[in-house]
Amino acid sequence: MTRAREAKAGAPAALALLLALGACPGEAPVPRGDVPLYPDTTPAPRFDGQLPPPPDTRITDINVQPDLTRDSGPPPPDTGGGGGCAANEQGFGGKCYRVVFTTNMTYSAAKSACAQNGASVVAIETQSEDAFVYSMLPAITTAAWIGLVRQGGSFVWESSGAGPGYTNWAPGEPNNDAGNEDCTVLWGPALTFANLRAKWNDAPCDSTPRDTVICER
């Protein structure tokens, strides 16, 4: 066989080998399992020497919730030193109150004790004022003088001459026992009969078991 015939006879076998190896005629065969790599022509980003700005972490909106823990009732009374009240007084409703103690005090002596401080025996005009005045009393077992007196058969507040728009009499009071109960007392928080505590009672103005008076100005 001549060389030309040998080359011609071997061409089909060589072509079959190239196709089996995944190569096209004229290309070098690629080994199985390898992936041909091509250069990345994407240009790299340029660095201009400046870093990007940090994220803005400032608080731009604050949702303030209401404080629901606070009491929504009336403000507490002034306990002295403010609103024109002295340190030994308590303020309520624009007035200043003080509890004064004197042994065996008649109503006349109670008025004098209040007047020494530029005050009058208390005139209780509302239920809230009544509750406040009662809360000032210590654990007395008797009663404190208040400024309600009988004049011409009717009770009036002595400091103003006005009739009471609010009262808190004990059951069956005022009864004017023996016809001489022309003044009024407020039963204390340590009274033996609990149902009478904080109640009012008419009493003789010269009654001396009283050691307490509430003054206001």
Image (cartoon, grey):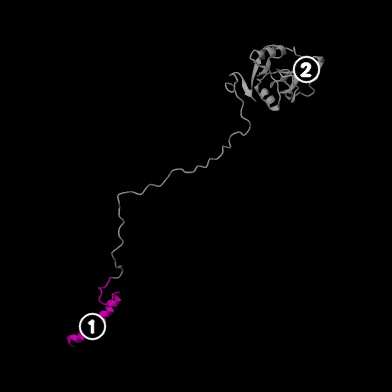
**Res 10 label:** 1
Q: Tell us which disc is closer to us: 1 or 2.
A: 2
List x then y, in percent, for residue 150.
Answer: 77, 17
* Mark 1 crowd level (few <14, some 14–19, many ≥20, 10 Å Cα): few
Tell me which amino acid carries mark 2: Arg
Q: Residue at x 65, y 18 (%)?
A: 99
Quarter of the picture containing the C terminus is: top right
Give the SS element for disc 2. Answer: strand
* Mark 2 crowd level (few <14, some 14–19, many ≥20, 10 Å Cα): some
List x then y, in percent, for residue 134.
Answer: 68, 23
Tell me which amino acid carries mark 1: Gly
Q: Which residue is mark 2?
A: 150
**Res 107 label:** none
- Between 114 and 195, which is closer to the camera in this rendering? 114
Is 4 displayed left or right of 43 in the figure?
left
Check the image and name the residue furthest to the left.
Answer: 2
List x then y, in percent, for residue 186.
Answer: 72, 20
Quarter of the picture containing the N terminus is: bottom left
> First in sequence: mark 1 or mark 2?
1
Q: Residue at x 20, y 87 (%)?
A: 5
Is 8 displayed left or right of 58 in the figure?
left
Magenta residues?
1-30
Quadrant of res 184: top right
Residue 8 in magenta stretch: yes
- Asked if disc 1 and disc 2 are in contact, CB closer than 8 Å, the reply is no
- Kindly tell me whether residue 106 is visible in this rendering: no
Quadrant of res 175: top right
Q: Main secondary structure of the magenta part?
A: helix
As displayed, is residue 213 above or below residue 76? above
